[in-house]
Image (spheres, rainbow, N blue to C red):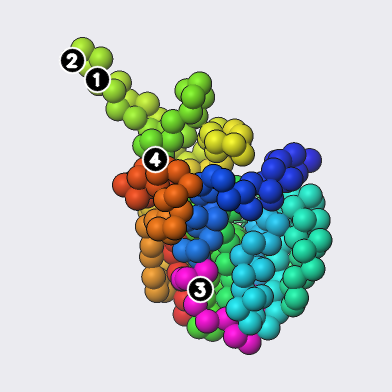
Amino acid sequence: MAGYDKIAKHFFERRADKTRFDYNRDIEVPAMIKMVGNVKNKIILDLGCGFGDHSKKLSQKGAQKIIAFDLSKELVKFANNQKIPNCKFEVGDMDRKLKYKNNYFDLVISGLALHYVKNVNQLFSEVNRVLKKGGMFIISTGHPIFDLINESLDNSSEAKIAIKRVGNKRIIEGDYFDESKKLADLGSIGKIKTYSYTFETFLKLGLNNGFELIDYLDAKPVPSSKKYDSEKYKLTTTLPTFILFKWKKK
Ligand SMILES: C[S@@+](CC[C@H](N)C(=O)[O-])C[C@H]1O[C@@H](n2cnc3c(N)ncnc32)[C@H](O)[C@@H]1O
């Protein structure tokens, strides 16, 4: 069973819960939708689409056609149940070659899913293949700087990087350059293993696979989310949680 299958219902319902601050709804999704811009008449691919939150918003903004896939069968069921116009949801794996034809999409997006992928180089090369010339690839992922404060209540987050002083000695926890899959504490989502790619890796993935960097963002929450949790709002406006890159196929 894919990791998100077990928590699919919680993942879906949590985002609609207006009693609490939500990192996806209040930071990542609005940042991604803003960076995407106009989608009228565009053919879009949504990689690691979850229950289809981004796809739904892009459909509402007038996208011509959206194909979206996710590894989690359960999340794809939630996506299909919403009956979003012009959207086709399916089960698929970003770690495998894409089944779509060359030069087909105007835009490919991937919201917070890249850090689950091992073959990231193959993925960038495949996205370049399926995009039209001049097409855009927009990704969001965890901000490497956020690992500095990725605390967990029981100290089990292997992704955490910290320097502590004990007497006159420095104790260094974690390793920014270690890109292996590590256990990260995602709060109410639970603990899940993710890759922790460096800024260098993200930049070279685009630059070495036929893309030009068009835009970059250290995402911040929307101001209206302050009312849900002023402490989380302060935290996420002081330290960046997510990064977004906008790549253009050369
Ligand atoms: C944090 S969620 C983001 C979901 C969605 N993009 C959103 O923002 O609502 C990460 C998603 O990546 C999916 N995922 C993980 N590994 C994957 C893979 N190899 N191929 C496709 N999807 C994958 C998970 O099932 C999960 O839905």
Question: Mark on residue 231?
Answer: 4
Q: CA distance from mark 2 to mark 1?
A: 7 Å
Residue labelled with disc 3: 36
Q: Is residue 150 left or right of residue 73?
A: left
Dot 1 corresponds to which residue? 165
- Where is residue 212, by image quadrant? bottom left
Depth-wise, is mark 4 or mark 2 nearer the camera? 4
Residue 121 seen anywhere in this rendered image of the structure: no
Q: Residues within 10 Å of mark 1 (few under 14, many from 20)?
A: few
Q: Is mark 4 within 8 Å of ligand 1?
A: no
Looking at the picture, how far across and down is residue 204, in whole percent?
A: 42, 60
The residue located at (54%, 53%) in the rendering is: 24
Q: Residue at x 55, y 64 (%)?
A: 124
Residue 77 in percent (x, y) is at 81, 56
Disc 4, SS: helix
Mark 3: few/some/many CA within 10 Å (<14, 14-19, 20+):
some
Q: Residue at x 44, y 49 (%)?
A: 227
Residue 234 visible somewhere in the drawing? yes
Distance Cα–Cα, label 2 vs label 3: 49 Å
Q: Nearer the viewer, mark 4 or mark 1?
A: 4
Magenta range: 33-44
Q: Which residue is mark 2?
A: 168
Q: CA distance from mark 3 to mark 1?
A: 44 Å
User: Dots 2 and 1: beta carbons under 8 Å?
Assistant: yes
The 10 Å Cα crowd at callout 2, few under 14, some 14 to 19, many 20 or more, is few
The earlier-in-sequence mark between 4 and 1 is: 1
- Report if the beta carbon of the residue with label 2 is closer than 8 angstroms to ligand 1: no
Residue 211 image offset from top left, x and y in percent? 46, 72
User: Amino acid type of disc 3?
Assistant: Val
